[in-house]
Image: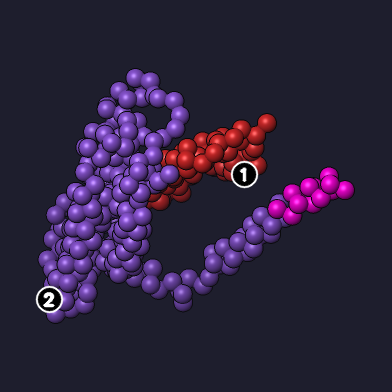
Chain colours: A purple, B red
Amino acid sequence: MNRINVISKKLYKIGLVVSLAIFLLFIFYDIHNLESNSKRYLSDHYISEGVQETGAINIVTSVLYDYRAFDTLGEATVLLTAAAILSFLVPITKDKMRGTPFTIIVSQTTQVFIPFLAILGMYLIFFGHLAPGGGFVGGVVIALIPILLTITYRVEFSEYKFKPDKKKVSEDIGAIGFVLIGLLGILTGSNFLANGQANVSLGDAGELISAGLIPYLNIMIGIKVGAGLAIIFNSLIKEK
Amino acid sequence: MIDLIFNMLMIFLLITAFFMVFTKDILTSVITLPIFGAILVVIFVILQAPGPAIAEAVIASGLTTFFFVITINKTEYEQNE
């Protein structure tokens, strides 16, 4: 009796997964077969007019930081709220990581590894409008540096290198700078976060300083995401 | 040739996904997640989507693994048989 119960419970789980998979398969099949000319006019507009209107070669960045920049502000606000609440709830007593200490190989490899991570993160942020990447991904790469320091050495060393107060200030600089750059559009008589419509000079498409306000928005988002993820990780590791 | 590689990678993706769900040891499951992410990165590059490939490589293979390792470290880790 018990054995039948266990088998039926396992079959129930597998059946749930399989039915969900079939459901998603039908939905994706229907989405794939939508009529192209009647319901895809927006993506056609982005692909054909995006480079002239925003100046960014990477169309993903032009959607994220120009056409739909307000959604990006919402995502950044979610991360800011999470980091603020976690650093508010962090206890005074510090808990240590359990487990064995690492050998010398791990610490030496970490020292060699960190400059490459910094260069890669900076590249992803600054070339966000020219190559794949962008503020979010570059910020995550930057945030991996204090996380590696925290895991390899201790929380104390990581917080001695990157002070928590400075991390909080830089996150605030990122969040407020994004909004201030957005307000530039209103000052010139257009909409919030307007770039090409507000007569910002777009420059030649393909150069490093081009695409109007998009590189500065990328830098702000990169600072904010990097500092926010580092704060979240250090707060979680101190939790008992 | 590229079709053969693509299909093989899809099969490996299914194998790693099922292994990740149905394995007993939770640490094995966590370490299988970056392998899943790495296979997915190659599939994204074959499908000519470099943006999601970079996001997947950084977030799924790097950040999520760190967070799961910390979660296992904080909670009681018991080896099941």
Is residue A146 or residue A44 the one in the foreground? A146
Describe residue A188's horizontal placement relative to residue B51 as left or right.
Answer: left
Kind of residue indicated by mark 2: Leu
Instruction: Give the residue at mark 2.
Output: A187
Task: Indicate the chain on which mark 2 is placed.
Answer: A
Residue A89 visible in rendering = yes
Residue B61 visible in the displayed image = no
Tag 1, which secondary structure? helix
- Image coordinates of residue A194 in percent, x first then y, are 21, 72
Residue that appears at 34% across and 70% down:
A45
Q: Which residues are magenta?
A: A1-13
Mark linked to residue B21: 1
Which x, y percent locates residue B68? 47, 42
Disc 2 residue crowd, few under 14, some 14–19, many 20+, Cα 10 Å? few
Type of residue at label 1?
Val
Q: Nearer the viewer, mark 2 or mark 1?
A: 1
Q: Quadrant of the C terminus of chain A?
A: top left
Q: Position of residue A230 (x, y in %)?
A: 31, 46
Q: Position of residue A109 (x, y in %)?
A: 32, 25
Is residue A16 inside the magenta stretch? no
Residue shown at 59% from the left, 65% from the top:
A27
The residue lying furthest to the right in this view is: A1
